[in-house]
Image (cartoon, helix red, strand yellow):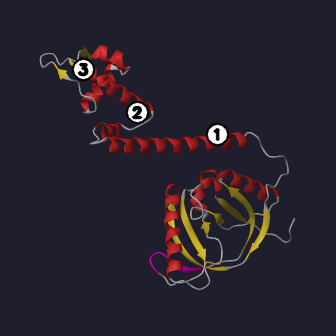
Amino acid sequence: MSSYLAIGDFSRATHLTVKTLRHYHEIGLLEPAGVDPRNGYRRYSTDQIPTAQVVRRFRDLGMPLEEIRTVLTAPDVQTRTRHITAHLSRLEADLGRTQRAVRALRDLLTPPPAGATAGIALRSVAAVQAAAVTETVDAEDSTAWFQGALGELFATVAGQGLAETGHPGGVFADELFTQHRGEVTVFVPCDAPVRPVGRVRPLLVPATELAVIEHCGPPSEVDRAYGTLAAYVARHALAVEGPIRESYLVGRRDTPDDTHWRTEIGWPVFTTSTP
């Protein structure tokens, strides 16, 4: 048989503050077993203690209140487990991002030896025929836009019976970096002009000269490679006007593990000979 506790005693039993318990009551997440109609005093059943403890654990794990409500009202164990597992997977992904950020920060605290070029090369890139998508995008939306455009390009090239002749790439206007909104072109080299369909258009990607560095890892950590490349170009007085280029040697289509992705970053330069 259940016993009942006043809100203060229930607060002590569950380590949830009285203010929190009142809020949970107001939003219907954890309603008291009864409320005295004369004075509004709440009372809780001792059977509610485990539920309150579960709610507290979920909040400690950062689960939103609406999601906790979904878990508590799940019609069966399988549904409840699915919601909890999804949240734990998000936590693991967040933890992975945090660990990578910590590693990157530790790397930054250990600068490379003076004069190191970090595998930077100077390269003349020939013009290439490609299927391309070009749009003006916000920097915060660029990753999702890029993956969608790239998928559309792969499907169009394959659907028209064309052969890919090189790694996919991207061309980024300066405004994307300086104003966080600018023109982006993503392209897939192919052996014949693509027929326009949807957003896809044929493009002759122009020839250029680049200082190139390879970044290994997820796009979120590419800034250090950019910084190293910019310092090299400035040090050798090679910089010229022109958009940044990237070439995707290994990406999502090759492996879902972004720690194995490889991206070449190209900074436009003017060279007369190889140093």
Q: Is residue 218 visible?
A: no
Question: Does 29 appear above or below 263?
Answer: above
Q: Tell how many labels.
A: 3
- What stretch of residues is rendered in magenta? 197-203
Instruction: State the separation of the CA atoms marked 2 and 1.
Output: 25 Å
Q: Are marks 3 and 1 in contact (CB under 8 Å)?
A: no
Q: Are marks 2 and 1 in contact (CB under 8 Å)?
A: no
Q: Nearer the viewer, mark 2 or mark 1?
A: 2
Residue depicted at 48% across the width and 82% down the height:
196
Mark 3 residue type: Ser
Q: Nearer the viewer, residue 186 or 37?
A: 37
Residue 224 point in image, percent of width and height: 69, 50
Q: Which residue is mark 1?
A: 102
* Label 1 neighbour load within 10 Å: few <14, some 14-19, many 20+: few
Q: Which mark is residue 58?
A: 2
Q: Is residue 84 left or right of residue 133?
A: left
Q: Nearer the viewer, residue 183 or 35?
A: 35
Residue 61 quadrant: top left
Q: Which residue is mark 3?
A: 45
**What secondary structure is marked by label 2?**
helix
Mark 2 residue type: Phe
**What secondary structure is marked by label 3?**
strand
Q: Which mark is residue 127?
A: none
**What secondary structure is marked by label 1?**
helix
